[in-house]
């Protein structure tokens, strides 16, 4: 039997099991991993109340926690962190699977849930639904769902590089890509291509491969495939997502912005406003989504900010599409 390649080990997918429908079950091991985060692990000078609570939850991560236990923690930042974490934990436990908890959050309000936690759920869900994917281009494109990107143009190509990797890298010899993006020196970043695609598996957790998002090339098509799989896994609806090279004969009967900037652009177009050249340049991709039960296509817009960053909002694909909610998870 051929062995499947592993990737994204840092998301902790090995800590979870699957239910009969293929969704990720919330395990004690996952809950304990959250307790090990630096925001929750008590420092050496933590009060006895915080250390006692942390130790008790490591023993039983599903243990109910009373308000007085939080109030007894001396440090105000620690009290806030614990309060946020326990609301998040209880949501995970209450829904049973990672997918159901994420759907519950995006449909009923994320409240004060830290973006870090939301992005981790997206990371886990994508690792689950892409488990048997062997196309590094689709995997790299899926990183856009949970990793902010910095965009730059080089030799006529629109290149996306991981923002955190660039910002947090150790200064080394200036890479051509980093120089092109006009960013501080960092570790070497390569643009994913046919020649180096096989190296993605060994470096997937470094997030140090950039993606060409030029219209008509493989990057945007790969992102379209990741979108198809995301919708299919969470909504149990089969869709076809087609990248468009140019915005010709586009009738925005229904559209979804895949990020905040794209939503603003879509709203402007919907209201009959003319986009100026600057706004048009911020559009990264335009897709046409087809769903069998709907006659007219739905358009998806992807755009970068004036600062050339991209922060995709994959929840918009779950809350903004006019399709039946026959999700595979409950």
Image (cartoon, rainbow, N blue to C red):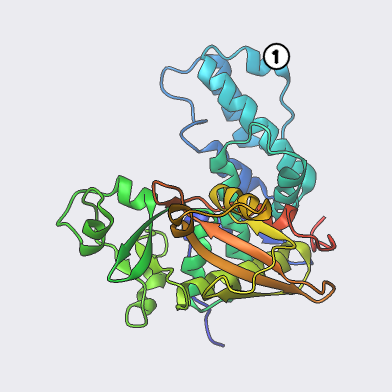
Query: Which structural element holds mark 1?
Result: helix
Residue 196 location, x and y as percent?
33, 78
Please state which of residues 307 and 101 is positioned toward the viewer in this rendering.
307
Relative to residue 145, is residue 219 depicted above or below?
A: below
- Which image quarter holds the C terminus? bottom right
Q: Residue at x 39, y 46 (%)?
A: 307
Relative to residue 22, is residue 60 depicted above or below?
A: above
Residue tagged 1: 68
- Which image quarter holds the N terminus? bottom right
Residue 87 location, x and y as percent?
69, 32
134 vs 59, left or right, is: left
Please state which of residues 170 and 26 is positioned toward the viewer in this rendering.
170
Q: Residue at x 41, y 22 (%)?
A: 44
Q: How many marks?
A: 1
- Binning the other alpha carbons within 10 Å of mark 1 as few (below 14), some (14 to 19) or many (20 upward) gives few
Pick out the residue farthest to the left.
173
Dividing the picture into quadrants, the one containing residue 191 is bottom left
Residue 142 location, x and y as percent?
53, 64
232 vs 12, left or right, is: right
Pick out the residue farthest to the bottom.
1
Q: Residue at x 77, y 63 (%)?
A: 235
Q: Would residue 161 be seen by someone viewing this image from the given angle?
A: yes
Please state which of residues 29 and 316 is positioned toward the viewer in this rendering.
316
Q: Would residue 131 be seen by someone viewing this image from the given angle?
A: no
7 vs 178, left or right, is: right
290 vs 306, left or right, is: right
Dividing the picture into quadrants, the one containing residue 199 is bottom left
Residue 147 location, x and y as percent?
48, 53
Q: Residue at x 63, y 63 (%)?
A: 300
């Amino acid at each position: 039997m051929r062995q499947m390649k592993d990737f994204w080990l840092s998301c902790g997918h090995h800590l979870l099991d699957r239910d009969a429908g293929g969704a990720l079950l919330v395990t004690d091991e996952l809950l304990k991993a959250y307790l090990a985060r630096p925001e929750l692990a008590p420092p050496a000078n933590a009060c006895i109340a915080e250390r006692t609570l942390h130790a008790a939850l490591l023993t039983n991560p599903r243990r109910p926690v009373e308000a007085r236990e939080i109030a007894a923690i001396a440090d105000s930042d620690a009290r806030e962190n614990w309060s946020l974490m326990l609301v998040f934990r209880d949501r995970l436990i209450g829904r049973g699977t990672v997918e159901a908890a994420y759907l519950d959050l995006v449909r009923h309000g994320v409240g004060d849930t830290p973006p870090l936690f939301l992005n981790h759920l997206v990371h886990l869900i994508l690792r689950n639904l892409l488990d048997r994917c062997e196309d590094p281009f689709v995997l790299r494109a899926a990183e856009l769902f949970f990793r902010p990107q910095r965009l730059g143009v080089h030799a006529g190509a629109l290149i996306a590089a991981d923002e955190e990797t660039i910002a947090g890298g150790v200064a080394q010899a200036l890479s051509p890509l980093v120089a092109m993006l006009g960013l501080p020196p960092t570790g070497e970043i390569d643009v994913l291509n046919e020649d180096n695609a096989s190296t993605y598996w060994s470096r997937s957790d470094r997030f140090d491969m950039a993606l060409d998002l030029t219209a008509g090339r493989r990057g945007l098509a790969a992102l379209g495939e990741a979108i198809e799989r995301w919708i299919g896994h969470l909504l149990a609806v089969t869709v076809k997502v087609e990248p468009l090279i140019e915005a010709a004969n586009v009738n925005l009967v229904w559209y979804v912005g895949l990020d905040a900037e794209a939503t603003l652009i879509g709203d402007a177009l919907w209201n009959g406003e003319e986009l100026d050249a600057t706004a048009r340049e911020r559009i990264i991709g335009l897709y046409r989504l087809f769903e069998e039960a709907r006659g007219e296509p739905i358009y998806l817009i992807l755009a970068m900010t004036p600062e050339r960053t991209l922060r995709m909002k994959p929840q918009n694909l779950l809350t903004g599409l006019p399709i039946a909610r026959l999700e595979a998870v409950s």
